[in-house]
Amino acid sequence: MISKLIILLMTLNPWFGVFAYKAIVTHHNVCSYKDMTYRSVRVQKQDDKCDVIYTKLGKDERIASRKAEDSCKTVFNTIVKNLEEGRWSCRKAFASGFTIENS
């Protein structure tokens, strides 16, 4: 229940789409540490490029920007793997195809 609330709050957070102007989220995981600290990792596809975005304490950071979505997916998977190896619990936040529009 708490993780669903965190996902909702992250979605409504005005910083969530700070890098996005009509981007489609193709991969998105929310990771928690002892159900107290949360991080978000997502791949956003926009036009002819993709970005890997890492959210910590409600602030987005662009980790990578690539032309090929497979390259972004590799970076995404590496970040999730590193978090899980650090005893973070990660799971998919929502289905791919979610669209972010910055107004």
Image (cartoon, rainbow, N blue to C red):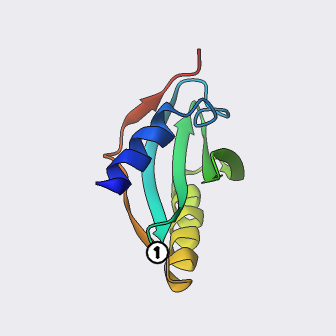
Name the spot of residue 100 as percent of width and height, x first.
49, 29
Q: Is disc 1 surrounded by few (<14), some (14 to 19) or many (20+) residues within 10 Å? A: few
Number of numbered discs visible in the structure rendering: 1
Quarter of the image where one finds residue 1: bottom left
Please, is residue 97 above or below residue 27 in the view? Answer: above
Left or right of residue 5, residue 9 in this image: right
Q: Residue at x 35, y 55 (%)?
A: 2
Q: Closer to the camera, 48 or 99? A: 99
Please, is residue 80 above or below residue 63 in the view? Answer: below
Q: Residue at x 53, y 85 (%)?
A: 85
Name the spot of residue 38 as percent of width and height, x first.
53, 60
Left or right of residue 36, residue 14 in this image: right
Name the spot of residue 58 as percent of width and height, x first.
63, 45
Q: Residue at x 52, y 22 (%)?
A: 101
Q: Secondary structure at mark 1?
A: loop
Name the spot of residue 7 as percent of width and height, x first.
41, 46
Please, is residue 37 above or below residue 64 in the view? Answer: below
Q: Residue at x 44, y 58 (%)?
A: 29
Q: Quadrant of the C terminus?
A: top right
Quarter of the image where one finds residue 35: bottom left
Left or right of residue 6, residue 73 in this image: right
Please, is residue 24 above or below residue 2 in the view? Answer: above
Q: Closer to the camera, 98 or 93? A: 93
Q: Which residue is mark 1?
A: 34
Left or right of residue 3, residue 80 in this image: right
The amino acid type found where label 1 is placed reads: Lys
Q: Closer to the camera, 74 or 14? A: 14
